[in-house]
Image: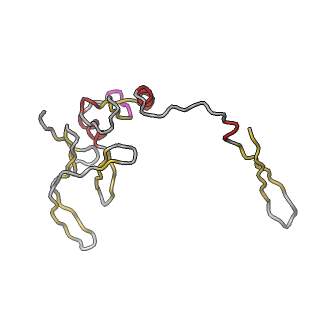
Amino acid sequence: MQEIWKDVKDFDGLYQVNNLGVVRSLDRQVYHPGNKSYHYRQGKILSCRINNCGYISVRLCKGGKVYTRFPHRLMAEAFIPNPQNKGETNHRDGNKLNNTLENLEWVTHSENMIHAYEKDLVKKRTNTNDQKLFYIPKIIRCRRSKNEKNRVQIKRTNL
């Protein structure tokens, strides 16, 4: 497969993503406000990390701020048309580390959750007796005297 590079949405001229899921920075001049000077920064392939949810992420900088982005989302925005304006990117095979274009698709949140349950990617809830696990505090406000502030008493009642 041939490598095709496209600009990252909202980071035009700073970063690019390719159809294989690699993100790179571009050559550019960087301004340092402390010493009021510019210096040349050569572009490079960005290192990736796996976040606590198991997704690959990269860090992009723009205007002195650092943004965490997901390569699968950047690839979808650059390469996969989204005519119905769906808001989420789904991994078809359920593998969060498989960021090939053939494995990505645009979905709604509802479609994404249905897919996750069908692929057993989320734990299904078991029936529990909610009355034993939870209680609702009942708040009672009462005035003791004119000199004292309102006091709050909380009665804990079971459902």
Residue farthest to the right? 145
| Colour pattern | secondary structure
Q: Position of 3 compared to 15: left or right?
A: left
**Residue 151 horizontal/vertical position (percent):** 79, 59
Residue farthest to the left? 2
Image quarter of residue 122: top left
Q: Position of 22 compared to 149: left or right?
A: left
- Taking the spot 44% from the left edge, 30% from the top edge, the residue there is 113
- Taking the spot 28% from the left edge, 30% from the top edge, the residue there is 103
- Taking the spot 39% from the left edge, 48% from the top edge, the residue there is 52
Q: Quadrant of the C terminus?
A: top right
Q: Quadrant of the N terminus?
A: top left
Q: Is residue 85 magenta?
A: yes
Q: 136 or 17, which lies in front? A: 136
**Residue 9 horizontal/vertical position (percent):** 27, 43
Please tell me whether the stretch drawn in magenta is mainly helix, strand or loop.
loop
**Residue 53 horizontal/vertical position (percent):** 40, 44
Q: 131 or 89, which lies in front? A: 131
Image quarter of residue 106: top left
Q: Is residue 91 magenta?
A: no
Q: Which residues are magenta?
A: 83-87
Q: 15 or 117, which lies in front? A: 117
Q: As displayed, is residue 104 above or below residue 30?
A: above
**Residue 4 horizontal/vertical position (percent):** 15, 38
How many marks do you count on the picture?
0
Q: As displayed, is residue 55 above or below residue 36?
A: above
